[in-house]
Amino acid sequence: MVVLRPLSFACPKCGSRDVLYSCSPSCCFNHVCSQCYATFEPETRRVGEFTSELGPLPDVDTTGPTAPCARCGEYRLFRVDGDSVRPDQVLCVSCRALLSLELVEVGE
Ligand SMILES: [Zn+2]
Ligand SMILES: [Zn+2]
């Protein structure tokens, strides 16, 4: 069994993890860094399939970082603590895709 953690990623400009999601999934996935005010959007790519047993879902802060699944479009993505998943990969709990996450559209 693996432990799921809320999604988090570092600002591509200053490296801070103090990143806020200020919009809503029906609009866009634009995030803002509360240290340097850089904006960016996460983009995912499917890299595999998760087949192990899932632990309980953690509580999710709605202002915390989030990203859309490249396969099903849902935004229930989590980081995974466990040996079956690389630390740079995230998991979609809706369709169980393993995804790599990239930050794009970086702006001031
Ligand atoms: Zn920053
Ligand atoms: Zn999915």
Image (tube, grey):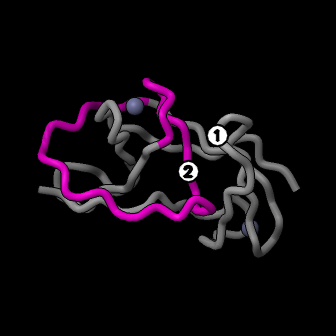
The amino acid at mark 1 is Pro
Question: Counting residues from the N terminus, which is met first, the one under dot 2 or under dot 1?
Answer: 1
Point out which mark residue 25 bears: 1
Closer to the camera in the image, 28 or 85: 28
Give the position of the N terminus as an image quadrant: bottom left
The dominant secondary structure in magenta is loop
* Residue labelled with disc 2: 66
Residue extending farthest to the top is: 71
Give the position of the C terminus as an image quadrant: bottom right
Question: Quarter-wise, where is residue 31 in the image?
Answer: bottom right
Residue at the (58%, 38%) spot, across then down: 43
Dot 1 lies on which element? loop
Is 47 rendered above or below residue 90?
A: above
Q: Position of residue 79 (x, y in %)?
A: 37, 56
Give the magenta part as a residue range: 46-75
Left or right, 92 with reference to 56: right
Q: Are marks 2 and 1 in contact (CB under 8 Å)?
A: yes
